[in-house]
Image: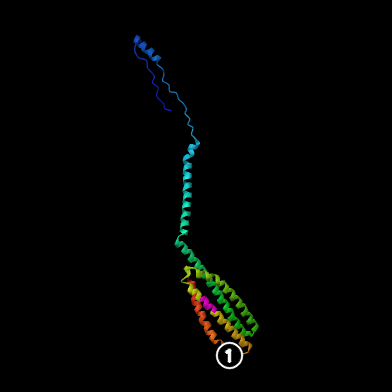
Amino acid sequence: MVSKPIHWGHPPNGPHTKANIAKCDEFIEKKTQVLHCKEVYYKFNRLSMLREPLMLIFGFFFLFVASIVYMHADLSISKTSASYLAKIQWEEVQATIHQVHTIISRCLTTHDKLEASLRDLSRTGDIQACKATRKSVDSSLKELTKELKSPVAFLQSSPQAAQILPKVEEVIAKERDLQERLMAKHSTVVDCYEKKLGGREIENRVASHQQKITALRQEIDDLMDLIDEI
């Protein structure tokens, strides 16, 4: 509302002449200027007021959804790339090599049981206990040999394992050779005890086996270290 000053007419000063009286009549007839004040109320549409905030919220929401879709699409593309597939295949090869390494280590631990049974035999002379240990060890080694078939087959079929496969096959072959040498030594020692042969005779009979066993064990340890680095 704007205020505006109201100007009131002033009667002319001076003697009351006809002219003055006429002017006074004219003054009286003038209307007072009055400003009428009106109260104005504005009514806003609530939906219109919420339009901009809602547009902003939906804009951020659609931007968020678009970002997720883009990331998903980008990830899907990257998973089909040659480098990604090669990386996955190499990780599978590494896991399989680790599995082979673990099985061979268990075989070597089982070999130690054979050697320990021969030491017990020399101390106690219990031939039957020594034979029982050999039977148990032989069964364990057969099971471990079966466990090797699957990982070895995978490595043979994987191009990523082409460089390391010869070393893996070599260590497996040497471990089997070591098994045979240990079993032969064990049988020879037990046979000597059954025949009640002396210690010198036993050493002479197992000397060739022992030399080969020592050499094979060293070669296997070296190959296992090489495989373990991978």
Question: Height in image: 194 above or below 77?
Answer: below
Residue 11: image location, x then y, percent: 37, 15
Specify the quadrant of the image occupied by residue 22. Answer: top left
Residue 181: image location, x then y, percent: 55, 82
The structure residue drawn at horizontal position 64% and vertical position 80%, both measured from the top left corner, is 132
- The residue indicated by pointer 1 is 201
Residue 174: image location, x then y, percent: 52, 78
The number of numbered discs placed on residues in the rendered structure image is 1
Q: Secondary structure at mark 1?
A: helix
Q: Nearer the viewer, residue 26 or 57?
A: 57
Q: Nearer the viewer, residue 124 or 167?
A: 167
In the rendered structure, the answer to whether residue 141 lies left or right of residue 162 reads: right
The structure residue drawn at horizontal position 62% and vertical position 84%, both measured from the top left corner, is 121
Task: Tell me which secondary structure the magenta stretch mostly adopts.
Answer: helix
* Residue 184 appears in the figure: yes
Q: Is residue 91 magenta?
A: no
Q: Is residue 174 magenta?
A: yes
Question: Height in image: 42 above or below 173?
Answer: above
| Magenta stretch bounds | 171-176
Of the 4 image quadrants, the one containing the N terminus is top left
Which amino acid type is shown beneath numbered disc 1? Glu
Furthest residue to the front?
157
Question: Height in image: 65 above or below 216?
Answer: above
* Colour mapping: rainbow
Specify the quadrant of the image occupied by residue 147. Answer: bottom right
The structure residue drawn at horizontal position 53% and vertical position 70%, both measured from the top left corner, is 153
Residue 110: image location, x then y, percent: 58, 77
